[in-house]
Image (tube, rainbow, N blue to C red):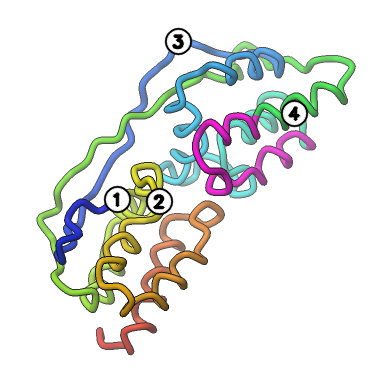
Amino acid sequence: MAQEENDRGFKIKDCALTAIATGRRAMNLRELRDIVQDIHPGSIYYHFWSGLLRPGYAPREYNNDFAAWAFYGLHDLRLAERLSVIDPTGGKDLESLRQELIDVVEERLDETEMVPWARRDRQFYFVRSQIVVFDTRVAIEQPEGLADVVKSMSTSSIFYHFIDARRRSDAQVDDFRAWLGGFTPRYDDLCSQLACVDPYFETLPELRDQLSAIMQDYFGGLSP
């Protein structure tokens, strides 16, 4: 289970993504493609997800680092748009996400007679992530407590429990659904609602508001 404390209690965790330099960089699209083919999977994860924890890094339409670089570094609007619509929750794992990224880049290379280059100060620097987890010492014993706790969770805690959990779970589910599954079938309807929430195309505050609204509505507005 993604949430190890599935023996009824749910412990609220918080997290931070630490950036680790890989020493690899790309100045043009072909170099980007070649590096993506064998870069540490943690780098793929970082460049798709860390922007959620770095508010204001790029306009929302360029919601991953690859798309932002295509626009700002290569000035390739068409490529930026194609990269931006890649949903990292759509594949089964990081390797399938890597392949989808490569496919988009190769398609653009096939269309382009001249490979675009970025200026030296606009190179793409590959970074990989390591997650650091903190115990908030907040816990709830029954699912009804989610109506109160979710709305006050930090955005990085939302990231940990609703996004990063999918990477940690063989079933690729968030911690809320993993925990609620232990009460099956009582909360199946709530789990179905949570499964419909796409965590990638929202900001973390928006995602928290959406999850809070689902919890508040499901539990009958028990919280003030």
Q: Is residue 213 visible?
A: no
Say above or below: 194 vs 19: below
Residue that label 1 marks:
2
Give the labeled residue for mark 4. Answer: 75
Q: Where residue 23 is drawn, which disc sits there?
A: 3
Is residue 82 a member of the stretch shown in magenta?
yes
Q: Examine the image and state in which quarter residue 113 appears.
A: top right
The answer to which of marks 1 and 4 sits earlier in the sequence is 1
Between marks 4 and 3 in the image, the one whose residue lies nearer the viewer? 3
Quick check: marks 2 and 1 in contact, CB under 8 Å? yes
User: How many numbered circles are shown?
Assistant: 4
Kindly check if marks 1 and 3 are in contact, taking CB atoms under 8 A apart as contact: no
Residue beneath label 2, please? Answer: 171
Residue under the point 45% across and 32% down: 46
> Can I make out residue 158 in this image?
yes
**Label 2, label 3: how far apart the Cα atoms are:** 33 Å
Q: Position of residue 54 (x, y in %)?
A: 43, 41
- Distance between the alpha carbons at the discs numbered 2 and 1: 8 Å
Residue 102 coordinates in the image, percent (x, y): 67, 27
In the rendered structure, which segment of residues is drawn in magenta? 78-101
**The quadrant where residue 177 appears:** bottom left
Rendered-image quadrant of the C terminus: bottom left
